[in-house]
Image (spheres, grey):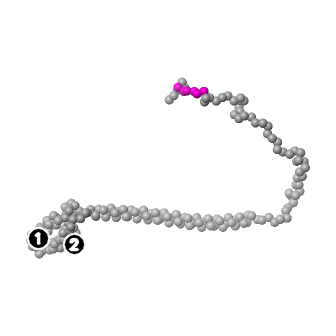
Amino acid sequence: MASRSDAIIVADDERLPNPEPGTSRPQRGPRRDYSYPDFESMVVNDDAADTAPSRKRKRTETEESSTLDRVFKKLRRALDHDIQQLRQSNIELREDIRLERNRRQKTQEEFSHLRKLDCKICYMQPDRWVALLCGHMFCKSCADDVFCKSCADDLATPKICPMCRVTYTGYVECKPFAG
């Protein structure tokens, strides 16, 4: 913090004393009198004309304005009701969109997980696949192991799929693909 002795005072920044103490603005001349004292006596003020009722029929603005007010209030209520319904519909649609996005994201995650092909026996991602007639896919080495273990007895004996236990007699080799 700076102390009082550290402050630098510049002479240009100081206020000059006012010529008249207590006033900050220069004095103006006397105010002008715009009244017409000579002509005021010639003007006749007719108070009797003001007290007599006029013969013209006055409009009842209150009835017209109240009718208009009622119509506008009725329209305003109808519009407010429509606006409220639209806002509620908007909220419901936004909620539907949010739910649809969540469902789509879950589906995409499941699809990306399913696209990643793993052998259900060894859990590896092989280059060469075989498809059994039931539709399950395994890597070639696992299918050969399963097929050869069960074919040791007899080649004509149907084999059993390790996933769904459906009998099969052979498999189809798949060409390598990007998985």
Q: What residue type is labelled 2?
A: Cys
Above/below status of 168 relative to 44: below
The structure residue drawn at horizontal position 49% and vertical position 64%, both measured from the top left corner, is 90
Quadrant in the picture for residue 156: bottom left
Check disc 2: other Cα within 10 Å, few if <14, some if 14-19, many if 20+. some
* Image position, residue 134 (x, y; %): 22, 72
Highlighted magenta segment, given as a residue range: 6-11
* Real-space CA distance between mark 2 and mark 1, rounded to the nearest whole angstrom: 18 Å
Q: Which residue lies furthest to the top in this view?
A: 5
Is residue 9 inside the magenta stretch?
A: yes
Q: Is residue 17 left or right of residue 104?
A: right
- Could you say which is closer to the camera, residue 139 or residue 127? 127
* Image position, residue 133 (x, y; %): 20, 73
Q: Is residue 18 left or right of residue 98?
A: right
Residue 151, label in figure:
1
Q: Residue furthest left?
A: 153
- Could you say which is closer to the camera, residue 167 or residue 175? 175
Tags 2 and 1 in contact by the CB under 8 Å rule?
Answer: no
Check disc 1: other Cα within 10 Å, few if <14, some if 14-19, many if 20+. some
* Image position, residue 61 (x, y; %): 74, 64
Give the mark nearest the N terminus, 2 or 1.
Answer: 2
Instruction: Determine the main secondary structure of the stretch shown in magenta.
Output: loop
Residue pointed to by mark 2: 134
Is residue 118 visible in the rendered image? The answer is yes
The structure residue drawn at horizontal position 34% and vertical position 63%, both measured from the top left corner, is 108
Is residue 177 inside the magenta stretch?
A: no
Above/below status of 15 relative to 171: above
Secondary structure beneath dot 1 equals: helix
Q: What residue type is labelled 1?
A: Cys
